[in-house]
Amino acid sequence: MNPKLSRHGLWLCVLFAAAQTSAQIPDLSTWTVHDPDRPQPPIVTPGTMGSAPSDAVVLFDGSDLSQWQHRDGSDASWSVMNGFMEVTEGAILTRQSFGDMQLHIEWATPNSGDGQNSGNSGVYLMNTYEVQVLNSYANVTYPDGQAGSIYGQYPPLVNASRPPGEWQSYDIIFRRPHFDDDGNVVTPARVTVLHNGVLVQDNVVLTGPTGHRNRPPYKAHADALPILLQDHNEPTRYRNIWVRSL
């Protein structure tokens, strides 16, 4: 043993070697390198600035809330004006359900309040896992509750917030959890978030559903569930919402 190698350094070497050994290398043996017969990826026409790609489900195009409802199944009643919707009363959920998804959503917070009382809302994936919406521009709060956080679990890697009143965007890649027949977690949920085009959550593993001041364990649920937008008594605005099932 190298006498200059500390016990801590030795353990790091052992752990690194174990990680390298256990890493799974994809099996690409079905196709040779640059095989011209390999299937071509499907063609998707990307949206222009402000519009959805050709294979997306448009959840809100600025005109109506026909894709949304309240928890009791009644029609969504948030205000719609000038191409956006504004939180009024009660959370709203998509009429359709989704599992693995790519979600694009744009939002703007009011210029009022401070801490958690400044534009507080949230995007709940599968009605269960929250990406926080908040005015976090020169507005300090607990890190795992600011804009771009996975609420109560992961602060954003950086604060990429624009000032209140300005439009912001989330691009979210979500992989749902998988459960066995007994309701045990086989694969936990993972999420990647770009806030205004900046990576703020990098394929993080979720510990379970979103809770307030606690971290509840996973509870088995359906493979697809609605997306929920939270009402937190703040007139937060949303526009240009679309989703691609993965």
Image: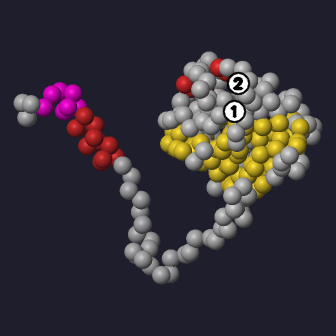
The residue where tag 2 is placed is: 118
**What residue sits right under mark 1 in the picture?**
164
Q: Secondary structure at mark 2?
A: loop
Q: Closer to the N terminus: mark 2 or mark 1? A: 2
Q: How many marks?
A: 2
Looking at the image, which residue sits at the far bottom? 36
Q: Does the segment drawn in magenta span residue 84? A: no
The residue positioned 30% from the left and 48% from the top of the image is 21
At label 2, the amino acid type is Ser
Magenta stretch? 5-11
In this rendering, does residue 188 appear at all?
Answer: no
The residue shown at (15%, 28%) is 6
Tell me which residue sits at (69%, 58%) in the image: 49
Q: Residue furthest top?
A: 213
Tell whether label 1 touches label 2 (CB within 8 Å): yes
Residue 58: in sight, yes or no? yes
**From what the image shows, is residue 42 above or below residue 184?**
below
Please state which of the two labelled residues, at mark 2 or mark 1, is closer to the viewer: 1
